[in-house]
Image: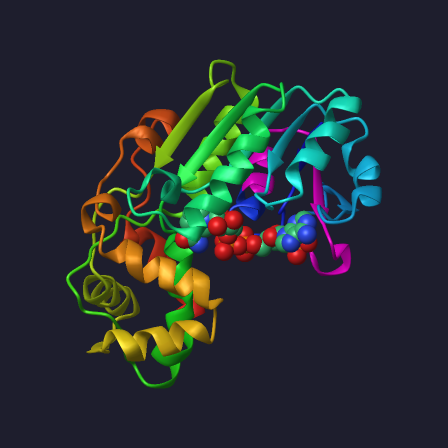
Amino acid sequence: MILVTGATGNVGRHVVEQLVEAGEQVRAMTRRPERAGLPDSVEVVRGDLAEPESLPAALRGTDRVFLFPMPGRLPGFLDAAKGFGLQRVVLLSASAVTYETPNPIGRMHEECEAAVTGSGLPWTILRPGAFMANDLHWAASIKATGVVHGLDDGAAGAPIDERDIAAVAVRALLDDGHAGEAYLLTGPEALTEPERVGIIGRVLGRDLRFQALSVEEARAGMLTRMPAEVVDSMLAMRAEAREMARVAPAARNLIGRAPYTYAEWATYHVNDFR
Ligand SMILES: NC(=O)c1ccc[n+]([C@@H]2O[C@H](COP(=O)([O-])OP(=O)(O)OC[C@H]3O[C@@H](n4cnc5c(N)ncnc54)[C@H](OP(=O)(O)O)[C@@H]3O)[C@@H](O)[C@H]2O)c1
């Protein structure tokens, strides 16, 4: 039995679906089972990484886990997991741990990685760059006005489709040979924000307009969605265009096919933008 924590999240939901497709027995952990909306064949349990007393019910009878990165809570989870005989941990981390610019996102994930690598359990770490799903926050303005506001600073990233992160997680959960590996995961192409908006427009068959904001204006918008520390970290990381724009081969090698392009991602999510 495989436990998927963060099972309702951008990546976790696909991990659950792909494990079910592979015929595996899956237990999905969420703080709110009534809202999980997961496949009927999945056992859904209430669990909270911040509530140690909720963990035994989630862990009992499982031998592998897809682990959501929650700083400060993983050592307790991993101790409990060892008591239940867990044998494999696949951690969701972030490419930010590899950036030269010190940043709070990287530090947070370094702490989570250290908990896993110091646990004594066999581990695999996934270090994705930006998720394509981040661009879903454009959906409201695309629907309402056809205009997307963002930064046109030339910074390109190689965002990855969450289904591909999940596909790598599934390989690491099911196959041997991934213990002790940390995989840098990106999408197949580096794209700027205006280029991504153009692709969404082509998929929708609409003429979308990208309107450039100053850094101050962009920061104000981001502060409505994320804490200041994270926003400033993200803006600082944009300066590391070299790091963000790299296309890493691991996803293709691990899942045995080309990772999804941005156009394929936008097509999958077309109804979110309509
Ligand atoms: N977005 C990116 O570009 C990106 C890139 C690289 C790495 N990452 C990392 O990936 C992770 C997920 O990011 P995201 O923005 O896409 O979020 P997300 O997956 O949408 O996160 C929500 C998930 O977190 C779970 N969760 C929250 N608090 C929890 C708790 N106390 N105990 C157990 N589960 C809890 C939620 O479970 P419930 O069902 O209980 O609500 C839900 O499944 C973050 O750590 C982020 O740093 C993100």
Q: Is residue 105 left or right of residue 33?
A: left
10 vs 33, left or right, is: left
Q: Position of residue 25 (x, y in %)?
A: 70, 30
Which quarter of the rendering shows the C terminus?
bottom left
Q: Is the N terminus in the top left, top right, bottom left or bottom right quadrant?
A: top right
* Image color mode: rainbow
Q: Is residue 156 above or below residue 43?
A: below
Residue 184 locus on image (x, y percent): 35, 34
Between 166 and 21, the one nearer to me in the picture: 166
In this view, the residue farthest toward the left is 154
Image coords of residue 260 (percent x, y): 32, 44
In the rendered structure, which segment of residues is drawn in magenta? 15-38
Confirm whether the magenta stretch covers residue 114. Answer: no
- Looking at the image, residue 83 sits to the left or right of residue 160; the answer is right
Residue under the image location 52 percent in, 18 percent down: 175
Q: Is residue 64 visible?
A: yes
Instruction: Pick out the residue farthest to the top.
Output: 177
The residue shown at (54%, 25%) is: 117
Q: How many marks?
A: 0
Which residue is more in the foreground, 79 or 274? 79
Task: Specify whether residue 21 is painted magenta.
Answer: yes
Q: In which quadrant of the rendered view does residue 164 lie? A: top left
